[in-house]
């Protein structure tokens, strides 16, 4: 697409201080994009694999389709939230690339043990005690400030795309949903991966990654009015792990998180009306293959485009 443009009701700040005026019309060059139908795009979490959602959105736009409803969790919430705020898929990919590069640079500058592909760097015993605590707080500060700069004070209820995301309240022990309020705060809460990013504090609640209880927020999409739900599947089936790799407390903790996320995903996926199987063969924290992951999402979506259009027609 040569000149994509998605507009919402408010103004959002883009990298470099640029702003985009947001209105309800959606155009792409001279072609009108359609947000017809009563359907939702539900974007699961998955870390680096979740960047495949960028390719999904690109393929939908290439075919003149805009989801009237988007829900997401963790990385899916961030991609869906930025899109709903007016960012184009190419811009989101650039943001992901720049943030990933700057994060790696920060880790190296602080002499953290960072493997070449950012795979399981957090398992090292050095992250226990003070290093884990300090790292999580620093990453939380960076995440919140980055999101604030990207979307400003835009509120979820002012977006032209109906958007929602979820998080887990550690105090109440329950899933919470965001369908109103500042967008950046909702995204910050949804992506707070345990130990790596400190919980978000909302009043008396401590909020972390929504995928821990519901990695595929289909129910939230139905609550927002979706008659049909499209889910890009980016998770990797849980595999057995050698006991030799589970010797540290951190490795045990993150293995437990893997199990919880896999169970959450497997229990919610059957609720979708249509699934796009992408399943990128990269690790959760491998942000060195962004282009490949995005392309996988785009190709998988294009291959399903006839089924997607049929589903949309049935949602009217």
Image (cartoon, grey):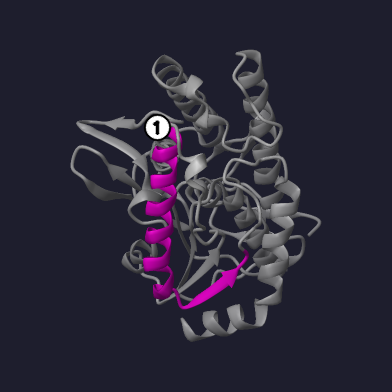
Q: Position of residue 41 (x, y in %)?
A: 50, 65
Q: Position of residue 255 (x, y in %)?
A: 44, 45
Visible residue check, residue 71: yes
In the image, residue 238 sits, relative to residue 122, either above or below, namely below
Q: Residue at x 40, y 46 (%)?
A: 257
For the image shown, how many numbered marks are present on the structure?
Answer: 1
Q: Residue furthest front?
A: 244
Label 1: few (<14), some or many (≥20) within 10 Å? few
- Quarter of the N terminus within the rendering: bottom right
* Front residue of this view, candidates 293 and 10: 293
Q: Position of residue 172 (x, y in %)?
A: 18, 42
The residue stretch that appears in magenta: 249-278
253 is within the stretch colored magenta: yes
* Front residue of this view, candidates 85 and 208: 208
* Front residue of this view, candidates 177 and 283: 283
User: In the rendered image, which residue does mark 1 sit on?
Assistant: 249
In the image, residue 116 sits, relative to residue 316, either above or below, namely above
Give left or right: position of 142 versus 300.
left
108 is within the stretch colored magenta: no
Q: Residue furthest right?
A: 2
Q: Which corner quadrant of the image does residue 171 belong to?
A: top left
Give left or right: position of 160 versus 31.
left
The prevailing secondary structure element of the residues shown in magenta is helix
Q: Which corner quadrant of the image does residue 205 belong to?
A: top left
């Amino acid at each position: 697409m040569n000149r994509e443009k998605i507009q919402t009701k408010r103004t959002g700040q883009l990298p470099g201080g640029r702003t985009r005026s947001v209105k309800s019309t959606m155009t792409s060059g001279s072609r009108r994009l359609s947000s017809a139908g009563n359907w939702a795009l539900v974007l699961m979490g998955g870390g680096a694999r979740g960047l495949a959602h960028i390719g999904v959105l690109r393929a939908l736009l290439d075919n003149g389709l805009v989801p009237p409803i988007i829900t997401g969790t963790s990385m899916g919430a961030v991609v869906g939230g930025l899109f709903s705020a007016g960012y184009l898929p190419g811009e989101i990919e650039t943001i992901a690339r720049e943030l990933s590069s700057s994060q790696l640079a920060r880790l190296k500058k602080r002499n953290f043990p960072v493997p070449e592909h950012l795979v399981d760097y957090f398992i090292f015993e050095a992250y226990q005690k003070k290093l884990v605590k300090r790292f999580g707080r620093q990453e939380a500060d960076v995440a919140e400030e980055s999101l604030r700069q990207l979307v400003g004070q835009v509120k979820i209820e002012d977006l032209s795309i109906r958007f929602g995301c979820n998080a887990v309240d550690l105090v109440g022990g329950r899933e919470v949903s965001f369908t109103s309020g500042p967008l950046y705060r909702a995204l910050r809460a949804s992506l707070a991966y345990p130990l790596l990013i400190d919980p978000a504090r909302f009043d008396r609640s401590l909020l972390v990654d929504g995928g821990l209880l519901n990695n595929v927020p289909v129910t939230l999409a139905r609550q927002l009015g979706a008659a049909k739900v499209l889910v890009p599947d980016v998770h990797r089936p849980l595999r057995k792990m050698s006991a030799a790799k589970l010797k540290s407390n951190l490795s045990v903790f993150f293995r437990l998180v893997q199990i919880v996320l896999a169970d959450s995903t497997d229990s919610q996926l059957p609720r979708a009306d249509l699934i796009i199987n992408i399943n990128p063969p990269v690790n959760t924290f491998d942000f060195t293959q962004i282009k490949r992951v995005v392309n996988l999402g785009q190709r998988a979506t294009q291959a399903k485009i006839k089924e997607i259009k049929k589903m949309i027609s049935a949602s009217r």
